[in-house]
Amino acid sequence: MDMILQIIISGLLLGGIYALVSVGLNLIFGVIKIVNLAHGDFLMMAMYATFFLFTVKGIDPYVATLIVFPAFILVGVVIFRLIIKPLLGKAETEVNTIIATAGLGFVLQNLALMLWKSDFRAIETSLTGKSYEFAGIMLSAGRTWAFVVCIAVALILYYVLMRTKVGSHIRAVSQDTEAATLMGINVNRIYTLTFAFGIALVGLAGVILTPTFYVYPTVGLYFNTMAFIIVVLGGLGSFTGALIGGLIIGLIESFAGVMASAELAQVFSLLIFLVILFVRPQGIMGKSARV
Amino acid sequence: MKNIMKQKQSLIVMGILALVLLGVYFLPLTVFAKHILVLTLFYAFMGTGWNLMCGYAGRLSLGHAAFVAVGAYTSLLLFSHFGLTPWIGMIAGGLVAVVVMLLIAYPSFRFGLIGPYFTLASIAVAEIVHYLLIYGRDLTGGSLGMSLPYVKGTTVINSIINLQFDSKEPYYLVILVFWLAAIFITWKMERTRYYLEAIREDEDAAAALGISVNKNLIIAACISAFMVAVGGTFYVQYFRYIDPYSIAGFTLSLNMALVAVIGGSGTLFGPTIGAFLLIPLTEVLRMSLGAQIPGLHLFLYGILLVVCIIFLPKGIASLPGIIRAKRAQKSTEDGPENQASKGVL
Amino acid sequence: MAEKILAVENIVKRFGGLTATNDVSFDVNKGEILGIIGPNGAGKSTVFNLITGFYPIDSGSITYKNQRIDGLTPDKICHLGITRTFQVAKPFPGLTIADNILVACLPKAARVADARARVQEVLKIVSLDKKANTLGADLTTLERKRLELGKALATNPEILLLDEVMTGLKPKEMDDMMDLIRELKKTMTIVIVEHVMRVIMNISDRIIVLDHGQKIAEGLPREIAENPAVIEAYLGRGTKKDA
């Protein structure tokens, strides 16, 4: 019984991390309706930034957030203007943005490879290797804090989207761009804002994850797949959905990892992903039909 | 009139290219140059196979490596365990790939999976194959990969049967034939190509005109899978080693898409153009700088892809068409009436 | 001597809570022009979608030349001889006009060459022969309508379903289109959905009227024009009250 509880708790913590990683993707995919295949690679970049800020300047990751988050907003704006905006509004926007972001991801991965080689990096903070014990259950310190941050981010995001004017604009644009324009909303500005925040959020996730994960150029690929599965599973544009999706995937991996091998756990998640895509692409919570 | 010319013209171009490439075989080139040629034609072949489904029908698959891996491992395993000649092995691999494709394609098209969802599904499929290959390590060697058992080429016949040669030239001839076959098959499927383009442009309109959407998509998908699976076998025979990361990985999938997209997806020679442009460039870069700066050639690859998709989304092959259209636009006047009633996509 | 070639019997179609088509029945006779009119939202296009297999019917039957066609896919129904145009024209935007027509000719052509041979001829009928190389995306509204008709004609239909072909045309263009339709009547049967009254009254042999998914009237144009139920459906009850 203890064992099962442990697996469940570990799974939930893992799920929280996945959910944190995918929040930015959900925003971009849900509002701008494009697939950002470079999502995981931005995560990777943030992890490297955190790594270097820690090892070179001694800045604790949680403090580094204050540097990385705004920096990534800027990065997001630049990337949007340079790459995404020229591709929007045309016949093959969907296909072209996928290819463009795939290329971008490639660029980022290999940039990291060129600059920092393929060695695995890790940092040791006060949290590394530490576990909290709670009623007989071991909770990895890093993951617990990541989970807490995830909940905090989700709440803040919820507040912004539901209770602020900007939030309502974002929701309007995600539901009907034409109508939003007619209402006087500057869709282009909303897109830029959303993209920038999506990138900043994944940057934030990268910072939080650095104490608990190895950093290497292709670490983004793994999280990328997970993020997409979660976003589709939970439902495009639904934050509760993404949270639930994250938790589900975390649980699945936790259980499957114990019962079968790590690879089968991945295969299982991917199969669920495929089934969702076929049968219910709007996910568990999503309302919008097929794109 | 124009179309008849295009079809006949293409045949002539095909013939000329084939002769030129055959002639290259006789040139005294360095081993490295020969390697580049083999690799270039390999990607031209793979890109052409990818193009049939993804270029003409417009369903972007970024997971085609799944079928390459299926073909490669099938023929390799048949050879290692039973000594089965790769020529039959590749047919077997191709058929297995077709089965895998049917398993995915049928529900995809039936459930109307389009656009980014289709692409994500294709990526997921490749990942599944990737992980299964690692999981089946008892059979496949897992992430350490598998080597091709070396068979000393005692006679020419033997070498041909085992599809293993000690020099690059015979491989060149083999891949040249494959490439030519792929182009020829695509060329011959004129009717299907038109149907696929119609389906890509507007599925409902195509169906209303009597075009069976599912049937055509599945035919294109299966032929595409078969072709790249055969390419997988060639890969094994040439490189003599495969591992899940390289043969089922996203990089290979992206490369196949890349050469087709940059060269011109949905055109007969687009992927070939893309391959001849990209592969020699990146191989030279890799050799000269790759040792000191790992990843540089892929980095430039990525930049090239992004730039190309922004400025020339339909690839290089669309350049003549664009120039022609710009010239036509300059000579005719766009009156206000025309502007107003122009249909919006 | 009226020869029935299409029999629509008691078809029903529901979308969730909305019954778009409610027990509609009518026949189409060979060689006639049957008009379908009705206020907006009456379900006219839905009927076309049901006949051509784009939506499945919930109940009822559709019989074409003694063969049940409800449940068949649109491409099969086209092969059998029923072709429809779309209310909002659907050209293939990335293909030239000539290729648009070529694609339409292909499914019923034994060889690609046969299809190619017919393209010019079809282009001439819809007066697009001079614009053969224009891309589908670059057409004016009128050209799109013509292309839409051209593609439908290219399939050599026995029954041609025209869905509001007149929308957006100027009076002179409408007259030309009417002449063309009258010409086409010599070789095929036509069912035409339309809003423009003078067109429908002028070219239809018979008219049926739909309102809220139900058939409320059927008969000769003259009879329909004087039918009180039809007038009420269009103008509402107690029109005197409207200022």
Image: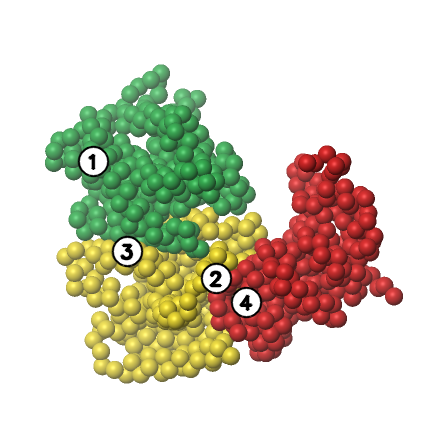
The hue used for chain A is green
Say if labels 3 and 2 share a chain. Answer: yes
Task: Categorize mark 3 by other alpha carbons within 10 Å: few (<14), some (14-19), many (20+).
Answer: many
Q: How far apart are marks 3 and 2 (CA)?
A: 40 Å
Q: How far apart are marks 1 and 4 (CA)?
A: 56 Å
Determine which residue is flagged by label 4: C100
**Of residues C134 and A251, which is closer to you in this image?**
C134
Q: Which chain is red?
A: C
Identity, as a three-letter code, of the amino acid under mark 3: Gly
**Of residues A166 and A160, which is closer to you in this image?**
A166
Q: Is residue B197 left or right of residue B127?
A: right
Instruction: State if disc 4 and disc 1 touch (CB < 8 Å).
Output: no
- Where residue B179 appears, x then y in whole percent? 39, 72
Of circles 2 and 1, which is in front? 2
Q: Distance between the residues labelled 4 and 3?
A: 36 Å
Identity, as a three-letter code, of the amino acid under mark 1: Thr
Of circles 4 and 3, which is in front? 4
Determine which residue is flagged by label 2: B338
Determine which residue is flagged by label 3: B302
Task: Categorize mark 1 by other alpha carbons within 10 Å: few (<14), some (14-19), many (20+).
Answer: many
Is residue B173 something one can see in this rendering?
yes
Determine which residue is flagged by label 1: A50
Residue at 54% x, 53% y: name it: B109
